[in-house]
Amino acid sequence: MFSWLGWTFRVQAQDVDESPLPGEHPSRYVCRLAYEKAVSARKFAQPAEWVVAADTIVADGPTLLGKPQDQAEARSMLVQLRGRVHQVYTALAVIPVGKGQPVQDLCCEDVAMRKYSDIEMEAYIASGDPLDKAGAYAIQHAGFKPVDSLNGCFACIMGMPLCHLARSLKSAGMPFQQDVSGICQQNLNYACPVYAQVLGWQGRYKQAESITGNKE
């Protein structure tokens, strides 16, 4: 998704322990992991760069649904979510390497899944696509189309809410002029109902620092 904006970037995968803490709320879980990934990746960055890390989790009530280990677990997750509403949390952490304070942000959306058939589900599982997706599904999958309705940030479900990223980067001091919301909607072919709210710092969207208390 960064390529949509014409930004130059490098991918630096980080191996952090993704085990949830006892009783950890999904919002705290993703915020903690995003921050830990950013801190870990900072040692590979140059002084003029910004480190961006994200983490996404699917939550069905208190149950966290990460990436399935195999087809059987993917099937179990998809059966559990079918025809019901769950939540997707995506957290961002931005660290300006040269100077400035880390900035964190959080997006949470309610997702209503459609009542897909067993035949549709099995074909999707056989494709292998669910195995690297939190909750065992991709909202953007053209063949499966698992989501019945969404009244929020589509990019959050994909794992990179670009408007939240834009406001975080601006808070961290990164200058850019791209129309992030317009570019995102055009590429996703989605009329976003919340981008103005997000970019205006209004409503239920808020910086995750107040939730996690993470400071450097």
Image (cartoon, grey):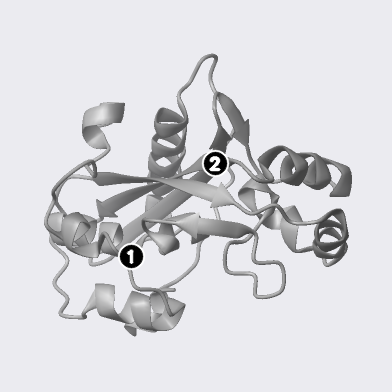
**x%, y% of residue 109?**
41, 47
N-terminal of the pair, mark 2 or mark 1, is 2
The amino acid type of the residue labelled 2 equals: Val
Residue lying at 37% horizontally and 83% vertically, measured from the top left: 186
Choose mark 2 or mark 1, whichever is in front: 2
Residue 53 lies, in percent from the top left, at: 41, 53
Q: Which residue is mark 1?
A: 162
Residue at 71% of width from left, 67% of height from top?
Answer: 144
Q: Report the front residue among 172 and 129.
A: 129
Q: Is residue 51 left or right of residue 87?
A: left
* 30 shown above or below 152: above
SS of the residue under disc 1: helix
Q: Is residue 117 visible?
A: yes
At 88% from the left and 43% from the top, the residue drawn is 72
Q: Where is residue 141, by image quadrant?
A: bottom right
Q: Quadrant of the C terminus?
A: top left
Is 136 displayed left or right of 23 in the figure? right
Q: How many marks overall?
A: 2
Cα–Cα gap, marks 2 and 1:
23 Å
Mark 2, residues whose alpha carbon is within 10 Å: few (<14), some, or many (≥20)?
some
Q: In the rendered view, would you say 216 is above or below 97? A: above
Label 2's element?
strand
Q: Residue at x 69, y 56 (%)?
A: 132
- In the picture of the structure, the residue carrying the numbered disc 2 is 85
Is any atom of residue 7 visible in this view?
no
Q: Which quadrant would residue 50 be assigned to in this image?
A: bottom left
Left or right of 17, for residue 183: left
Q: Quadrant of residue 39?
A: top left
Q: Position of residue 107 (x, y in %)?
A: 35, 47
